[in-house]
Amino acid sequence: MHGMKATVLFLFLLVIVARLMLRWLNLSHLRRYGSRVPEEFAAVVDGDTLREAAEYTVARDRLGLVENLIGNLLVLLFFFGGLLTFYDQWISGIDGSFLLKGWLFFGGLFFLQYLLDMPFSLYRTFVLESRFGFNTMSFRLWCSDQVKSLLVGMILLSVLIVGALALVKTSPAWWWLWVWLFFALVTLFLIFLSPNLIEPLFYKFQPVEKDDLREKIRELMARAGLTVTRVLQVDASRRTKHANAYFTGIGRVKRIVLFDTLLEEMTDREILGVLAHEAGHWRLGHLWKRLLTVEMAALAVSLSAFLLVGGAESGTLLWLTPSSFFARLTLVGFLLALAAFPLTPVSSWISRRHETAADRFAADLTGDAAGLAHGLVKLAKENLANLHPHPVYAWFYFSHPPVVDRVRGLIKNGSVDEGRTKFIKNSNSQG
């Protein structure tokens, strides 16, 4: 038992060291190359903007480092310092059913995590984001968002906990399969539910005010073979100056949502390029492939949990002696997360391939590779993106290719003959 505990502790510390080394590599690379403006960005990004982007990257990384170090310290105390056993015994001493104790166990952990995240959210919003001019949120709106997020999270978590534990009790030999299926159905249900019930709790949606842009978007989606039911803009500017756009919906019910900040910062040509990229994910089946991959991984996790945890009755697992089903399940989740860490580059690589394919689709669909490239350059500038991530850091973590690589790929491989000189010239005229 003690040998296994020491082995797991060593692996956990190894993961921490690996993450710290990746951070160090990325920041060292930024210090070395961060003052160089890529040729493709020269007309839009100047030295002052690049320095500000570097400062923003460093500030976010430092906050993330503090947050991770505190989180890792708490994980050490919880799993290796006896807090999990103490918490498990406290919950086990409460009179109540299996479902009630499970709801208290996991609900308590969720609420504790929420409380621990709150100070970092507060600092990130009103110190870090405000320092770089991104935050537009009032403290009252932040508090409102926090309360709504907590309530929505507790409701969804309660449904998942009670439903899953009821299946564990009902089908002791096959609960891993039924719980996985239950979670998969809830995921699909939320894809339908979120745009119409959850998102409107936080944002106000309305049809895109520019009639000509709305029609251009519909025509573009029709060429892509997609039927879009609604083209909406959202009041993101109440919270941030960051810009974004996304698709929601599934099946025949799809809608496009544009941040009002995006509409203010981009030309119609650039917006169409960004949306053509999103359409590429739909037409190339990336969303379904990702969903299928996630569900297959979830099925493997559910089966692994069943084999390691055992039944609902009290038992032992590694150094937990004796322990409840909930404590054993929590420890298994921690172990599986450790095992998944080396697989991060695989997931990142698959995602980057999808993003590159969607870029090519957008260039072919619009016949204007430079439109999307201009949009990416402008987004990178407005969001103070790091233009010089370390290649190893990007390979390990990035779900999208580095923006400089994306722009160069569009210029080189676009469906129209858009040479580098012509692109930079156009950037000058649009900047």
Image: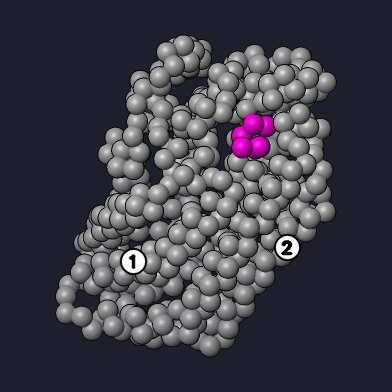
Label 2 is placed on what type of residue?
A: Trp
Disc 1, SS: helix
Q: Which residue is mark 2?
A: 24
Label 1 is placed on what type of residue?
A: Phe
The quarter holding residue 429 reads top right
Please check the rendered image and state whether residue 274 is part of the magenta-colored stretch, yes or no.
no
Q: Residue furthest bottom?
A: 2
| Residue in view at x 70 percent, y 16 percent | 415
Residue 192 visible (yes or no): no
Left or right of 168? Residue 184 is: right
Does the CB distance between marks 2 and 1 fall below 8 Å? no
Using the image as rendered, state which of residue 230 and residue 284 is in the foreground: 230
The spot of residue 54 in percent (x, y) is: 71, 50
Using the image as rendered, state which of residue 61 and residue 321 is in the foreground: 61
| Residue in view at x 66 percent, y 37 percent | 381
Disc 2, SS: helix
> What is the number of the mark on residue 42?
none
| Residue in view at x 29 percent, y 42 percent | 201
The kind of secondary structure the magenta stretch mainly shows is helix
> What is the number of the mark on residue 111?
1
The Cα atoms of the two marked residues, 2 and 1, are separated by: 32 Å
Left or right of 138? Residue 397 is: right
Residue 79 sits above or below residue 189 on the image: below
The spot of residue 231 in percent (x, y) is: 40, 22
Number of residue marks: 2
**Start-end of magenta stretch:** 377-382
Q: Residues within 10 Å of mark 1 (few under 14, many from 20)?
A: some
Disc with the residue nearer the chain's start (2 vs 1) = 2
